[in-house]
């Protein structure tokens, strides 16, 4: 719950920032000189890119949470079987062992979104965020009946 509150707080702060920056861009455009119009358009590009990124990130998180709820209802969420250091961090060798098993499961059933979801969790535990995101995107696409993106 804390992560969700933090996410929405930061998203709200970003939206306020985008509105303020967008206002500056519009003010520059209204001056009507070629250089201020060019700068104004450039300034407006930043909030547009930011809003696009925020929208896609929010949509991704909602889809991943939807899959997690469905898998939890089925009793298929991966168990936390990782060893931890005294400070509470995940033991790297333990994460690698779980990852190897999850990768084999996903390779054995490449069309099963559940195995890709569990592989995404294993990537995350192994601190490989880019691959965790790609595996989760694949799980979402498979779940929704879309062809997963290659690459």
Image: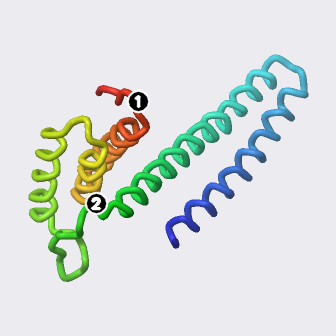
- The residue at 60%/37% (across/down) is 52
Q: Residue at x 40, y 33 (%)?
A: 145
> In the picture, which quadrant includes the C terminus?
top left
x, y percent for residue 13 = 67, 57
Pick whichever, 17 or 129, lies toward us: 129
- The answer to whether 121 is drawn above or below residue 87 in the figure is above
Q: Is disc 2 in contact with disc 1, using a CB cutoff of under 8 Å?
A: no
- Taking the image as shown, residue 59 lies to the left or right of residue 112, namely right
The residue where tag 1 is placed is 146
Question: Which SS class for mark 2?
Answer: loop
Give the quadrant of residue 37.
Answer: top right
- Quarter-wise, where is residue 127 in the image? bottom left
Residue found at the far right of this picture: 31
> Can you say whether 22 is above or below 9 in the image?
above
Residue 31 x %, y %: 90, 27
Q: Residues within 10 Å of mark 1 (few under 14, many from 20)?
A: few
Dot 2 or dot 1, earlier in sequence: 2
Q: Residue furthest front?
A: 74
Residue at x 54%, y 65% (from the top left corner):
4
Residue 3: give x, y in percent of width and height: 50, 67
- Across and down, in percent, residue 70 comes to 41, 56
Query: Which quadrant holds residue 142?
Result: top left
Q: Is residue 25 left or right of residue 127?
A: right
- Residue drawn at x 48%, y 48% is 63
Instruction: Please identify the residue farthest to the bottom as the structure is shown.
Output: 86
Residue underneath mark 2: 76
Under circle 1, the secondary element is loop
């Amino acid at each position: 719950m804390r992560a969700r509150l933090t996410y929405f707080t930061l998203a709200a702060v970003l939206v306020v920032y985008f509105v303020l920056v967008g206002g500056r861009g519009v003010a520059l455009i209204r001056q009507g000189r070629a250089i201020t119009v060019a700068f104004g358009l450039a300034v407006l590009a930043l909030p547009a890119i930011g809003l696009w990124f925020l929208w896609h990130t929010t949509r991704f998180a909602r889809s991943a949470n939807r899959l997690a709820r469905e898998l939890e209802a089925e009793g298929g969420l991966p168990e936390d079987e990782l060893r931890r250091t005294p400070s509470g961090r995940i033991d790297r060798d333990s994460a690698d062992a779980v990852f190897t098993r999850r990768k084999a499961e996903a390779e054995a059933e490449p069309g099963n979104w559940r195995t890709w979801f569990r592989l995404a969790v294993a990537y995350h535990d192994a601190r490989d965020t880019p691959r965790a995101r790609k595996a989760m995107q694949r799980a979402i696409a498979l779940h929704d009946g879309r062809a997963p993106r290659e690459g």
